Image: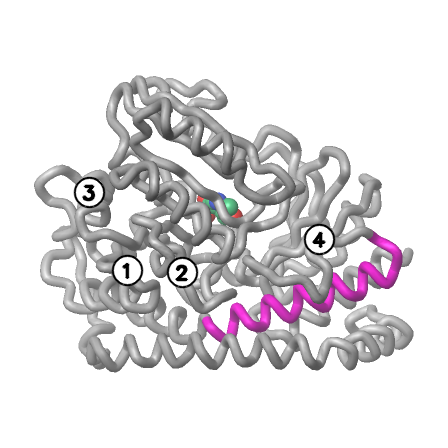
Amino acid sequence: MNDLNISKETLDFIEEEEIKLKDIFSKIDKQAKDNSMKVLAGFQKYEVSESYFNSTTGYGYNDLGRDNIEKIFAYVLDGEDAIVRSQFISGTHALTVALFAYLRPNDIMLSISGLPYDTLHEVIGIVPNNSSLASFGVMYEQIDLVDNDFDYEKIKDYLKKNKVKLIEIQRSKGYSTRKSLTIDKLEKVIKCIRELDKDVIIMVDNCYCEFVESKTPLTVGADVMVGSLIKNLGGGIAPNGAYIAGKKDLVDLAGERLTCPGEGREVGPTLGINKSLLQGLFMAPSVVASSLKTAILASKCLEDLGYNVEPKYDEERADIVQNIIFNDKDKLIKYVQGIQMGSPIDSQAVPMPWDMPGYEDQVIMAAGAFTQGSSIELSCDGPIREPYIAYQQGGLTYEYGRLGVARAIEELKK
Ligand SMILES: *Cc1c(COP(=O)(O)O)cnc(C)c1O
């Protein structure tokens, strides 16, 4: 045992597995190179200078850095515009702001990727809440995926019979057992929707998917996309926040809802975070690559140790999330605890299953992160329900990510 409590046997195993992953890792490096070109071009196009790091307080009028950060995000994401703010408390908050900005009483919101992420259930009113969209008279309908793809027949049929205001598509699997949705699948379904309805707002929950592929939902025709800055695009450096990017009128509407009608995007002090947001975006292509490599390593190792994994190490990926299906409550808990033990922060803490606001089952979470709740940092969580799946994601550097996975494997062996 070394000082990290990882046996030589486990470290040797990891090294042997890494050799088998060389070709896949070099494809990921290529992706990071392409995305880095895009980010650097965005910085240069909008002439980032030290003055952008200046801060505003109070109302936050005339924040040059903030306004240009939003232009750079729009450029990088292939959108007309973007709103990127620390006043978004989380990804869920940004999704909530967008939904309340676009939907009005009697409108229909249709999810075509099945049940949305757990924290949106009370927002939509799937779980009753006095402040939900449902409480304002917004109707919600849902079409489930079939065989990990969209149910084209049901979607077409529904759109022919109903006037839908907004279609929501969640790419990452959330706490479900389905696969995450690649840009190719998204492109195909958007084409199909547009043949039937030119006006419906196509909104994509893009959490965990940024920089995994070169195209974004906006590249392939979505109207608006939403994501969190304590995930991929924050690069592990943004201290909080989220973004909404896409059509200018939709980004403006989101601004009017985030602050207030009439003030919209003109207000919003940055309180000193501009430099962190720029530096985070700058690092993001390579941090996402590290996260992908960490996920792929975990997939390969755990599969070879006899566990079911999704995706497999050599499968095409849409996001940075790795599932390990334990079919065993104790093993799930052990693995998550092992990830915590391999973390830089709070490695001495032992995570336990807990009730979390917004989640229906108890959840166990390993989060030995610099930023609270940051899941672009190596983190692992799982709802305590069958089939006891660990959802692992993140890894600021691959070198630390692999040590976290090694420590978790060590714990699993006990
Ligand atoms: C993380 C995530 C969200 C938002 O979560 P927050 O923790 O509120 O930032 C929404 N949808 C998906 C698919 C996610 O992965």
Q: Which residue is mark 2?
A: 216
Mark in the foreground, 3 or 1: 1
Left or right of 68: which side holds 132? right
What residue span does the magenta drawing correspond to? 285-307
Does any atom of ligand 1 lie closer than 8 Å to the CB of label 3? no
Q: Residue at x 47, y 62 (%)?
A: 232
Q: Position of residue 167 (x, y in %)?
A: 38, 37
Residue 188 versus residue 150 in the image, above or below: below
Residue density around tag 2, few if under 14, some if 14–19, many if 20 or more, within 10 Å: many
Residue at numbered disc 3: 253
Q: Are marks 2 and 1 in contact (CB under 8 Å)?
A: yes
Q: Say what amino acid the circle numbered 2 marks.
A: Thr
Residue at 44% from the left image edge and 28% from the top image edge: 157
Q: Amino acid at mark 4?
A: Glu
Q: Which mark is residue 79?
A: 1
The structure residue drawn at horizontal position 58% and vertical position 50%, both measured from the top left corner, is: 180
